[in-house]
Amino acid sequence: MIEIIAAMAVVTFLTRLCGLGVRLRSEWALRAIALVPVAAFAALVSTSLEVRPEAWFRWAVVGLGGWLSWRGAPVWVSVAGGLLVYFVGTSLIR
Amino acid sequence: MRSAFAKGFAEALPLWMGVVPFALVYAAAGRTAGLAARDVQLMSLLVFAGGAQFTAVRLLAQGAPGVMLVAATGLINLRHVLYGLSLAPHLGRIRGWLRGLMAFLLVDESYGLAVRAYLAGRGSVPYVLGLGTSMYLAWNLGTAVGSASVALLPDPRRAGLDLVFPLTFVALLGPFLRRANNRRAALAAFLLGIVAVPSLPGGLGFVLATLVGVLVGVWGHD
């Protein structure tokens, strides 16, 4: 098992290191790379939520977190606010 | 330098709410799949990649060979290449060992906060290392506690703590959405994430959604 874990560690480290070691110079590439966080965050949000009718409240809570952030709230306020609404909402629904 | 490190460490603390419960669940899943407590912890100490570790444990429970675990790890972590490419222009010239340390500590959450800090003009290498160290500590503490108390753990999904993950990323996304081409990129990646991730293996769906989002954003550049 230790050999497998070591191989997993090496593969993970290399995927993290190889991007950090590359300096892009073309303007097109730099513009594309500037969009990576936007696209990655959006994909991370949608892939963390299930698409089924019963999950509507979770989508609404995440939408609320996004709105708070868009209005200028810091990250921790959006996270804590969303969780608070979720806890209160689910206790009322139950 | 020390204060930037401490600032990064502290700014990642709210994310412990989401990371620790999942480390607990990962440890419980690993022990249930037949891994020794030592191996469960060693994976968190050396690999430090939640998605890949969960997948490895699931594959182990199904009796998959080691080579498949390693291949799945590579697929799931492909997104880190994009994260690295995106952070590299902000780093300037730094020593090789520091770059290596940053690479080791680069996870979704630390990347998100790091890129936001750099774009706001307050990012630095010690700050990013502080973020990564905080996440590393949370993940490993959660793993240790989870390994030791497998039978006592509640399901964090039932408590809604899994929402910390999408809430964190939607909060990081919000400020970007003021520009039209960012909105187009985000919408494309968001929609494709819903469609592609369940239908493609490993992390390919996520990588595809991100790349298409980037292309849509570049194509419609303001």
Image: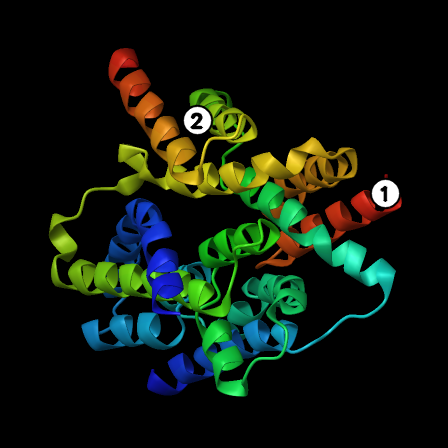
Contact check, label 2 and label 1, Cβ < 8 Å: no
Q: Residue furthest top?
A: A92
Task: Please identify, in this view, whether the residue under mark 2 or under mark 1 is nearer the observer.
Answer: 1
**Three-letter code for the amino acid on which mark 1 is drawn:** His
Distance Cα–Cα, label 2 vs label 1? 32 Å
**Three-letter code for the amino acid on which mark 2 is drawn:** Arg
The relative height of residue A52 versus residue B37 in the rendered view (above or below) is above
Left or right, residue B162 beside residue B196: left
In the image, B81 versus A69, the foreground residue is: A69
Q: Are marks 2 and 1 on the same chain?
A: no
For label 2, the SS is helix
Q: Is residue B109 visible?
A: yes
Q: Which residue is mark 2?
A: A58
The x, y position of residue B193, in whole percent, is 64, 42
The x, y position of residue B131, in whole percent, is 40, 60
**Quarter holding the N terminus of chain A?**
bottom left
The x, y position of residue B90, in whole percent, is 63, 65
Count numbered badges in the picture: 2
Would you call the spot at circle 2 few (<14 residues within 10 Å), some (14-19), or many (20 or more)? many
Q: Is residue B67 visible?
A: no
For label 1, the SS is loop
> Mark 1 falls within which chain?
B
Choose top left, top right, bottom left or bottom right for residue A41. Answer: top right
Q: Which residue is mark 1?
A: B221
The residue depicted at 12 percent of the width and 63 percent of the height is B148
> Mark 2 falls within which chain?
A
Choose top left, top right, bottom left or bottom right for residue A28. Answer: bottom right
Would you call the spot at circle 1 few (<14 residues within 10 Å), some (14-19), or many (20 or more)? some
The x, y position of residue B162, in whole percent, is 36, 40
In the image, B164 versus B119, the foreground residue is: B119
The residue depicted at 32 percent of the width and 33 percent of the height is B160
